[in-house]
Image (tube, rainbow, N blue to C red):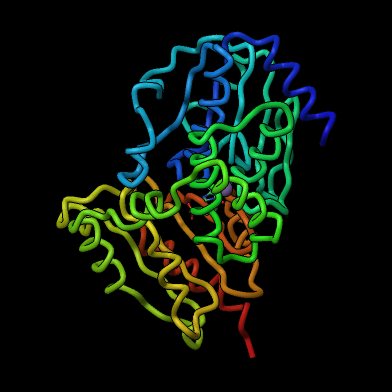
C-alpha cells in the first residue's frame, strides 16, 4: 500500500486537471471524503472538478459549497480522476463515462466487494470508512488542516453510526483523537449532522416507520419510503435518512430493510445486526456493500420487491 500511496502522490504532482467523484446519492462518508480531498488538492493549486450524481442531503449542505460541484459534464478530459467510496464503477451513476476520459484513475474505498477498477486501487475493507482510509493516505505526504480534519471526521462519524458499528477499531478511535486535536468541533458537527432535521422530514420518517411489517419471527422488518409519503410531507428522498438503522434497533430484528420508491426502479437498503451478511443478497441482485450494510437497485415495484425480499430472507432462519 505504501508504494501505491507514493504513486498517487507522483500522479498528483504531475497532474493539473483533476476530477474527484463519489457515489450516486452521496452519503456522509462520500461527501466527507470528496470534500477532504478537494481541500487537500485545492491547497496544491490544482484545477478540480467534483462530480456527484444526486442531491446533497440537507444536513451536509452547510459543509459543502455546491458551486464547486459540476452541474453538467461535457466529457472533459482529466489528467487524473479519484473515485471515492464506490464499490464498482456503476456507483458513479451518470458520471461513469468520466472514467474513460481520464488518463489515470485512482480508486480509494473500503467495500469488500470492490474488485479494484482503477489504475491504482487502494482498498481496505478493514477500514471503518473511506474517510478513515483517505486520512491515512493524505497524512503520509501532507499536513491536515482543521477543515480537512472536519471532513474526515464527518466521514467516519456517519459511516460508523457515531462510532458504534463493528467496523470501528481502536485505531479508528486513535485517528479520531488526532482529528479532534487538529481542531474538529465535535458538538457543532453533531448538531449540524444529526440535530438539524426539518419537521417535515421527521414527519415523513414517522410515516415510514408507521408502515413497518415484521416477518420471520420478527427477525426481518421492512418498510418503504413511497412517493406518496414524500409528497404528503413535502420531503425529498435524499433528505429522509436513518430509517433502516432505526428499525434495526427493534430487539428481535436481525435484518432491516427500507425500500425507496423511485420513478422507474426501487432502491433497496439492508442492515444486519449480527451474523447475516446482507451484501450476499445485494450482490445477487447486482448491488453490493458490507456485511452489515448493503443495497441494490431493482427495476420492479415496491410491492413485488417486498415479496421478493421476504422470500429471500426466509431461508436464513429456518428452524
Ligand atoms: P445505503 O443502504 O445506505 O444506500 O447503502 C449501504 C451500503 O451498501 C453502502 O456501503 C453502499 O455503498 C452499498 N450500496 C447501496 N446500494 C448499492 C448499490 O446499488 N450497489 C452497490 N454496489 N452497493 C450499494
Ligand atoms: Mn463508506
Rendering coords of residue 126 (x, y %): 72, 54
Q: Residue at x 60, y 33 (%)?
A: 144
> Does residue 215 lie above or below 177 as drawn?
below
Quadrant of the frame with the C terminus: bottom right
* Image point (66%, 48%), residue name: 111
Q: 209 or 297, which is in the foreground?
A: 209
Give the camera-side residue of 99 and 66. Answer: 66
- Taking 4 as reference, is 106 left or right? left
Looking at the figure, which quarter contains the N terminus?
top right
Please provide percent x and percent y for residue 176. 60, 51
> Could you tell me residue 299's position as x and y percent?
44, 49
Q: How many marks?
A: 0
- Residue found at the far bottom of this picture: 319
Q: Is residue 60 above or below residue 275?
A: above
Instruction: Give the residue drawn at x 51%, y 36%.
Output: 146
Picture coordinates of residue 100, whole percent (x, y): 62, 18
Q: Please name the residue shown 37% across and 77% down the image.
A: 213
In the image, 216: left or right of 246? right
**Furthest-right residue in this view:** 3
Amino acid at each position: 500500500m505504501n508504494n501505491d500511496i507514493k504513486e498517487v502522490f507522483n500522479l498528483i504532482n504531475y497532474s493539473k486537471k483533476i476530477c474527484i467523484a463519489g457515489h450516486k446519492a452521496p452519503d456522509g462518508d462520500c461527501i466527507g471524503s470528496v470534500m477532504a480531498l478537494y481541500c487537500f488538492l485545492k491547497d496544491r493549486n490544482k484545477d478540480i472538478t467534483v462530480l456527484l450524481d444526486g442531491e446533497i442531503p440537507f444536513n451536509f449542505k452547510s459543509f459543502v459549497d455546491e458551486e464547486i460541484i459540476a452541474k453538467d459534464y461535457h466529457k472533459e478530459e482529466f489528467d487524473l480522476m479519484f473515485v471515492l467510496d464506490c464499490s464498482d464503477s456503476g456507483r458513479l451513476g451518470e458520471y461513469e463515462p468520466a472514467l474513460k476520459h481520464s488518463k489515470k484513475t485512482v480508486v480509494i474505498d473500503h467495500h469488500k466487494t470492490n474488485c479494484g477498477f482503477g489504475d491504482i486501487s487502494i482498498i481496505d475493507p478493514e477500514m471503518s470508512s473511506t474517510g478513515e482510509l483517505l486520512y491515512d493516505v493524505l497524512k503520509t505526504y501532507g499536513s491536515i488542516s482543521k477543515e480537512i480534519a472536519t471532513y474526515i471526521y464527518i466521514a467516519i462519524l456517519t459511516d460508523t453510526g457515531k462510532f458504534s458499528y463493528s467496523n470501528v477499531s481502536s485505531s479508528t478511535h486513535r485517528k479520531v483523537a488526532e482529528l479532534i486535536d487538529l481542531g474538529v468541533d465535535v458538538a457543532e458537527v453533531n448538531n449540524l449532522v444529526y440535530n438539524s432535521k426539518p419537521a417535515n422530514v421527521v414527519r415523513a420518517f414517522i410515516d415510514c416507520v408507521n408502515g413497518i411489517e415484521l416477518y420471520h419471527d420478527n427477525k426481518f422488518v421492512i418498510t418503504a419510503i413511497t412517493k406518496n409519503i414524500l409528497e404528503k410531507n413535502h420531503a425529498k428522498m435524499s433528505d429522509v435518512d436513518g430509517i433502516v438503522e432505526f428499525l434495526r434497533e427493534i430487539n428481535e430484528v436481525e435484518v432491516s430493510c427500507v425500500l425507496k420508491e423511485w420513478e422507474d426502479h426501487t432502491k433497496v437498503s439492508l442492515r444486519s445486526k449480527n451474523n447475516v451478511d446482507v451484501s450476499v443478497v445485494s450482490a445477487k441482485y447486482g448491488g453490493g456493500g458490507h456485511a452489515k450494510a448493503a443495497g441494490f437497485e431493482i427495476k420492479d415495484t415496491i410491492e413485488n420487491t417486498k415479496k421478493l425480499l421476504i422470500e429471500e430472507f426466509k431461508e436464513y432462519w429456518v428452524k
